[in-house]
Image (cartoon, rainbow, N blue to C red):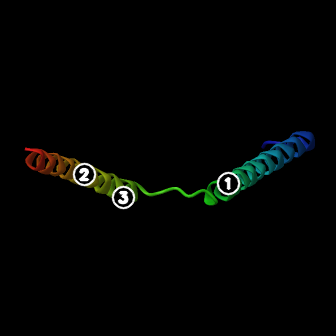
Amino acid sequence: MQSQNPMIADFVKLANSAAGTLAGMGREARDAARERAKETFGGMDFVSREEFDAVKTMASKAREEAEDLKARVTALEARIGS
């Protein structure tokens, strides 16, 4: 038969309570930090990867068209000048 020491039982209860409290504080701190990050980054205008890639493709096509037009203008100017 095992006898329980009331002092040890009280210490175990205290340790369990402290562990629960620390875990709760950790969860609250993590949730508060996540909420602050959402507030901070929520006001910024970030674009998605898909939007970025679409604009990058459009800019590339526009650059190619501008180069083609520049070549055509140069050819027309050469034809007019001769």
**Circles 3 and 1: CB distance less than 8 Å?**
no
At label 1, which amino acid type do we have?
A: Thr
Foreground residue, 9 or 72? 72
Q: CA distance from mark 3 to mark 1?
A: 23 Å
Q: Residue 8, relative to residue 53: is it above or below?
A: above
Q: Nearer the viewer, residue 18 or 47?
A: 47
Give the mark toward the camera: 2 or 1.
2
Q: Which mark is residue 50?
A: 3
Residue shown at 78% from the left, 50% from the top = 25
Q: Position of residue 34 (x, y in %)?
A: 66, 54
Apparent side of residue 68 relative to residue 36 in the rendered image (left or right):
left
Residue under numbered circle 1: 40
| Residue 56: percent from left, percent from top | 33, 52
| SS at badge 2 | helix
Residue located at (8% from left, 48% from top): 79
Name the quarter where the C terminus is drawn: top left
Name which quarter of the figure residue 52 lies in.
bottom left
Rendered image quadrant of residue 12: top right
Disc nearer the start of the sequence (3/1): 1
Task: Please state which amino acid type lies under the numbered disc 3.
Answer: Glu
Residue 66: mark in rendering:
2
Q: Secondary structure at mark 1?
A: helix
Residues 65 and 25: in front is 65
Q: CA distance from mark 2 to mark 1?
A: 40 Å
